[in-house]
Every structure is written in structure tokens, then in C-alpha cells.
């Protein structure tokens, strides 16, 4: 039973528990879904084993980073026709998706600021050359804000009032919860004005206009086409091979969350390289012996 954001699994453990009887195992595609499943495992309520496809290297290193990175900017551009060059772009998070967004926004001439709550990720962002600061400090500087954290209210009441007139605010993380839209509405005069197909303009009581893109839902899906097929292929290959692994092994596994077996990850990378016509070197017997020996090379 393949899943997205843990939604199907959630249903099979609550309202449709009756349908879970025949399920021997599952796979889960997304970051958010895996977080939910791990908390179900910790609470001892998971009824069958699940492979966390999101944690395959050939999933998150490519789908989340390059897929979300590109398609998020595609969504922002299609929704607004904004020129990224020269704009100050605030990216919330420096995880797999958000770093892809930050890297690509910088590559298109954006002046990118990163916000984080994890010191390690923040340090990486600093050393990758980004300005890093709290959202409250970034709020008055940004022209475009993009969240991709999986967290709630990353842009909140305390930030909207500090923003420039005309700021663009978009989410590419989890559902529509990363931007506190009810607060934005409460701080605004009257109803938002639809200024373009995917742009709702809120006018704050203090006068600034804040443009919310795609109702705060994943902007790459709302206003663009999601990820290109040529990166989703690796995610779905992981899903398919993990489903096969589950069919063969689920009955001997405990109802826990499992990582994708390393052989599957390697196989997906090998197949992708072959499909792209890229050949790589193989270890010579001499090199294999050298790398495996603790007696040599120190
Ligand atoms: P990740 O765990 O690699 O990154 C999330 C980052 O956000 C972490 O570094 C974390 O420290 C940071 N963070 C958490 N709360 C924060 C806050 N309040 N302020 C600043 N940073 C904060 O996760 P990943 O894989 O990048 O996924 C992020 C979200 O994007 C998830 O909800 C995931 O489901 C979603 N996603 C969306 C896709 C799309 O098509 N738009 C595709 C893949 C994932």
C-alpha cells in the first residue's frame, strides 16, 4: 500500500481500520508522511511494516532538492511573472527541498536569505554563501518569501506587519499550514483581492499589500506542474522496488518504519545513470583490495 503524507495509513488506522486487515506492508513517499509514521511507531500503534521511501538517497537527494527546487520557482514565476534577478528571496528552511529552492533562486540572480531552526543546517547555509537570520529580521528585507519546512506558522502574525508593501508569500512545504493565513486575514482590511489567477492580495490594516500565492498550498502543484517526470522516475522506482521488497519480506518484519534497503537505492542510481547514458568507473581488483584492507594506506 503506497502512501503520500501518511494520509492513507492514517485512514487505515482510524476510520477505515476494517480495510487494514489484508494489508501486509506499505511504503511512504513524503517527508511529512515519514514523520507521522515514526510517531505512530513510537506510540506502538502501527499495524504493519512500512518502508520510508522518502529516506532513500535516490529520492530525497534528487526529488526533494532538484524537483521541488525547480518546480517551486516555476510555480512562483507562473503565478506572478516576477523577475527573480535582483530580488531578495527569503527561503524558510535549509532542508532538502528548501536548499534546492535557495540554490536555484540564487542561480537566477536572487539575493537569498535563509531562515532555519537547526544550527547544523543554518551553518551549512552560511558556508554555502547564504545570509542566515531569524524570520523577524528577514521579514522587512524580503521581496519574495517561500516556506518548505513541514512546520506550521513559519510565517506568522509577528512577520506580516514587518513586510514590505507588495511582498509575495508562497509555500512549498506541508499542506497550507506553513503560512498563518487565518492571522493574515485577521490583520487585513476586508476580503483579499484576486489580482491574478493564483495571487490573492491582502491589504493589512497598516496599509501594506501582501500577495499570497496559491492559497498558501504547495505552489509547485497549485500554479505549475509539480516535479518533472525525469526526477519523479527515481522516486517511483523506489516505490515499486520497495513494494516488491515488502511483498517478499513483510511477513518477517515487525510493524516498524524501515529505510529503503541500500541495494535498492544503488540499483535506482545505476538505472538512472544508464538511462542518462552516463558511464562510471568500477574498482579494479587492486583497488578493491586496497580499500578493504586496514593494513594498507595509513
Ligand atoms: P527536511 O526535514 O529536509 O527540511 C525541513 C527543514 O526545515 C529542516 O532543516 C528544519 O530544521 C527546517 N525547519 C523546521 N521548522 C522551521 C522553522 N520554523 N523555520 C525555519 N526552518 C524550519 O524536509 P524536506 O524533505 O525538505 O521537506 C520539507 C517539506 O516539504 C515537507 O513538508 C515535505 O513533505 C514537503 N515536500 C514538498 C514537495 C513539493 O512538491 N512541494 C516535495 C517533497 C517534500
Image (cartoon, helix red, strand yellow):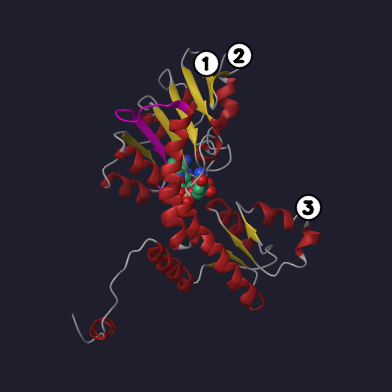
Q: Is residue 169 visible in this depiction of the protein?
A: yes
Name of the residue lying farthest toward the right: 18
Q: Is mark 3 within 8 Å of ligand 1?
A: no
What residue lies at 59% left-to-right and 21% top-to-bottom? 186
Q: SS class of the residue under badge 3? A: loop
Which residue is identified by label 1?
A: 203
- Which corner quadrant holds the C terminus? bottom left
Q: Is mark 1 within 8 Å of ligand 1?
A: no
How far across and how far down the image is residue 149, in percent?
48, 44
Say the numbered circle drawn on residue 15.
Answer: 3
Which residue is identified by label 2?
A: 190
The answer to whether marks 1 and 2 mark residues whose Cβ atoms lie closer than 8 Å is: yes
What residue lies at 68% left-to-right and 57% top-to-bottom? 9
- Which corner quadrant holds the N terminus? bottom right
Between disc 3 and disc 2, whose residue precedes? 3
Q: Is residue 131 visible in this depiction of the protein?
A: no
Between disc 1 and disc 2, whose residue precedes? 2
- Horizontally, residue 127 falls left or right of residue 82, namely left
Name of the residue lying farthest toward the left: 298
For residue 249, above or below residue 66:
below
Highlighted range, magenta: 80-96
Amino acid at each position: 500500500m503506497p502512501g503520500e503524507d501518511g494520509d492513507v495509513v492514517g485512514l487505515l488506522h482510524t476510520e477505515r481500520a476494517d480495510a487494514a486487515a489484508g494489508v501486509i506492508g506499505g511504503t511512504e513517499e513524503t517527508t511529512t508522511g515519514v514523520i507521522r509514521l515514526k510517531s505512530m511507531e513510537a506510540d506502538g500503534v502501527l499495524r504493519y511494516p512500512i518502508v520510508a521511501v522518502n529516506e532513500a538517497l535516490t529520492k530525497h537527494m534528487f526529488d526533494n532538492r532538484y524537483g521541488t527546487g525547480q518546480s517551486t520557482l516555476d510555480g512562483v514565476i507562473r503565478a506572478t511573472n516576477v523577475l527573480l534577478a535582483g530580488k531578495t528571496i527569503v527561503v524558510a528552511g535549509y532542508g532538502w527541498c528548501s536548499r534546492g529552492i535557495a540554490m536555484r533562486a540564487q542561480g537566477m540572480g536572487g539575493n537569498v536569505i535563509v531562515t532555519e531552526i537547526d544550527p547544523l543546517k543554518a551553518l551549512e547555509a552560511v558556508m554555502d554563501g547564504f545570509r542566515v537570520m531569524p524570520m523577524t529580521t528577514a521579514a522587512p528585507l524580503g521581496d519574495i518569501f517561500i516556506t518548505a519546512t513541514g512546520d506550521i506558522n513559519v510565517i506568522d502574525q509577528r512577520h506580516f506587519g514587518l513586510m514590505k508593501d507588495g511582498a509575495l508569500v508562497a509555500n512549498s512545504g506541508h499542506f497550507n499550514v506553513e503560512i498563518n493565513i487565518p492571522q493574515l486575514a485577521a490583520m487585513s482590511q476586508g476580503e483579499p483581492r484576486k489580482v491574478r489567477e493564483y495571487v490573492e492580495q491582502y491589504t493589512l490594516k497598516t496599509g501594506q499589500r501582501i500577495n499570497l500565492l496559491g492559497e498558501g498550498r504547495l505552489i509547485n502543484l497549485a500554479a505549475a506542474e509539480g516535479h518533472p517526470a525525469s526526477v519523479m522516475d527515481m522516486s517511483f522506482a523506489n516505490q515499486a522496488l520497495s513494494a516488491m521488497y515488502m511483498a517478499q519480506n513483510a511477513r518477517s518484519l515487525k510493524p516498524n518504519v524501515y529505510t529503503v534497503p541500500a541495494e535498492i537505492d544503488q540499483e535506482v542510481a545505476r538505472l538512472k545513470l544508464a538511462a542518462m547514458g552516463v558511464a562510471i568507473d568500477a574498482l579494479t581488483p587492486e583497488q578493491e583490495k586496497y580499500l578493504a584492507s586496514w593494513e594498507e594506506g595509513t
